[in-house]
Image: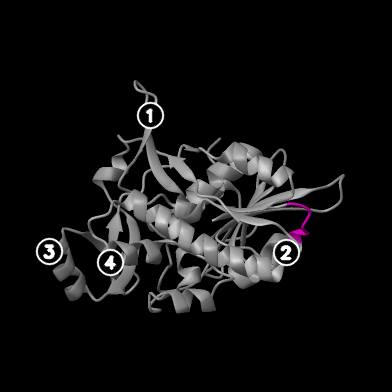
Amino acid sequence: MSQLWPRFPVQSAGRVTQAASLEGGSKASKKVAVVAFGGNALLSRGEPLTMDAQWQNATKAGNGPQVGLLAVQDPATGLDVLDAESEGQIGYILETQLANTLPGQEVVTLLTQTVVDPADPAFKHPTKPIGATYDKQEAERLAREKGWAIAADGNKWRRVVASPDPQAILEARAIQLLLANKVVPICCGGGGIPVAVDKERHRRYGVEAVVDKDLASAVLAIKIKADWLLMLTDCDCIFDPEQWPDRKVPLPSPISPQQLRTHTFAAGSMAPKVEAACRFVAATGGRAGVGRLEDAAAILQGSKGTVVAPPPPGLAAPGR
């Protein structure tokens, strides 16, 4: 989800939800941060897929577990419609909790459409985990029965679906207008509703996919010229992938996009966060952070998590 916060201090980042944007500080020095909450923040790994569980964790957010549950309940409905349904469900929970936490502040949930390329190679190579976790034998049985693609997720297995690269957020201008009028929009839930555009007929249509919310948040953050892209998940920071999972060795922080790109990260988990951070920092010169939800304010202060930042002036990128 995305929320745009007019006139809120950056320290309020710890209260925001799936992908939020904050504006704060004095009139002379306002800051904007887009905050993307991991899919396992609203529902932790292995937690039952129930609305009660989501309400109990409503200061957090996600979409992968939720849209997977909806797909099991309603297998005949397309993923684009289920994306919209889960975006509305999660948005309602977050909007209610934010309204209760911030009395007097206008908060709205905005269904957001994300443009993708229907020829994206991701449609032939699904990587996005959705739904519940299973042991390998159960996952293989479901794959045979339902025609799912499956992949390992830690020591469990999950269904995986296509996750094409986001190209644009159709409601970006509306989001900017809401922010300018001091309204907090909750948007880009689960990466937004994936749509493609028929260029000959000038019409949009939904596609079967789940867009990565970190990459979609980066597209939004670049468009609105945010100062920060903050990605909150169930990990302390970005760990060295060459030593993971045997050893949890944090990468240096701050770290530049050029340094991050020398590592190879697991597809469908940390890789999209790293790619989103690199794209945002390279495009804007701003900063990106990755870490735990409860550490949001500390990440912004540089004391926790991993901060991705431009290299110091005059320092050449590796290989140049």
Q: CA distance from mark 4 to mark 2?
A: 36 Å
The disc, 4 or 3, on the residue closer to the chain's N-terminal end is 4
Query: Of the residues shown, which amino acid type is indicated by label 2?
Result: Ser
Name the residue located 55 percent from the left edge and 46 percent from the top edge. 218
* Camera-side residue of 198 and 320: 198
Relative image position of residue 62 (x, y in whole percent): 47, 64
- In the figure, 259 relative to 44: above or below? above
For the residues bearing labels 4 and 2, Cβ distance under 8 angstroms: no
Query: Of the residues shown, which amino acid type is indicated by label 4?
Result: Gln
Q: Is residue 41 visible?
A: yes
Q: Which residue is mark 1?
A: 203
Q: Which residue is mark 3?
A: 144
Q: Which mark is residue 73?
A: 4
Marks 3 and 1 sit apart, C-alpha to C-alpha, by: 36 Å
Kindly give the residue lying farthest to the left in the view shown: 144
- Give the answer, above or below, for where 49 lies relative to 13: below
